[in-house]
Image (cartoon, grey):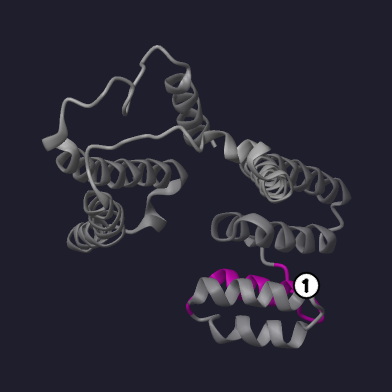
Amino acid sequence: MDELDLRIGLLLAQQDKVNQATKTWDAIGDRSTVASTLSGLWSDPPRLLPTAEAQIQKTLNGWFRYRALTKLYQLQQRSQAVSQLQVTEQAIAQRAFFKWAGANLIPTVLGFSGLSLLIFLIWQWVSKGKQALLSGTDRVTWETPWDGEVVWQVMIVGFFFVGQILLPLAIQTVRDQLHLSLETFGERGRAFYFLITYLLLASGGLTVLYQSIKPFLPLPDGWFRLRWQGKWVLWGLVAIWRRFRW
């Protein structure tokens, strides 16, 4: 809560609500030395503590650190330090933007392309009838050896109950028993945690799928084929490496 109040105070100060910001910091001043430091920076006249920069570097991070350091350097008339801080912040912002673009641009483009293709196919089916692309598979059938009950079993039991209820509850129970908190893992620790979680969720659904179709084995050639020679394994490893690297 004290850390949250520190950030709320910086947000208020950035909005020129200095009185509210200093009141927020003064309320936790006895429990946080950096709160007294921030209150001194925005007081009139300012009070600069000799350990102000070290406290800000140690306690704050991200945008909040840059705002506090900018205020400190301006009061100390260190124009070069302010310029260097702005350059650093700009570089971090650019890296964050490229990471966001890389993670969202491709799915957005593919989603828009798929939606456009779907609209085109529906329009063609309505306007051209049997000559449309969607009508070209009317005489092609794909017979499955199981009925709708097995399909619902895989969807409801495997991918809904196991994947969305049973395994998440089990993972949360283990975390509570071991007193694990994601906030203490760090970026790579959280990435590894989510990787393990997704593998467990996929394993649960695939296990139910296998047990459901086991009575119908062996399946016809081409069903659920797994080709290790393809490039999909390489793409997956590259994606994992990039996630851990970030």
The quarter holding residue 209 reads top left
The quarter holding residue 132 reads top right
Residue 100 showing in the rendered view:
no
Q: Which residues are magenta?
A: 31-48
Residue 45 located within the stretch drawn in magenta: yes
Residue 77 located within the stretch drawn in magenta: no
**Residue hosting label 1:** 14
User: Which amino acid, by three-letter code, is at mark 1?
Assistant: Gln
Q: Is residue 195 left or right of residue 53?
A: left
In front: 112, or 217?
Answer: 217
In front: 10, or 79?
Answer: 10
Residue 113 showing in the rendered view:
yes
At 19% from the left edge and 38% from the top edge, which residue is drawn?
A: 213
Q: Secondary structure at mark 1?
A: helix
Residue 238: x, y in percent? Answer: 50, 25
Residue 15: x, y in percent? Answer: 80, 77
At 31% from the left edge and 27% from the top edge, which residue is drawn?
A: 223
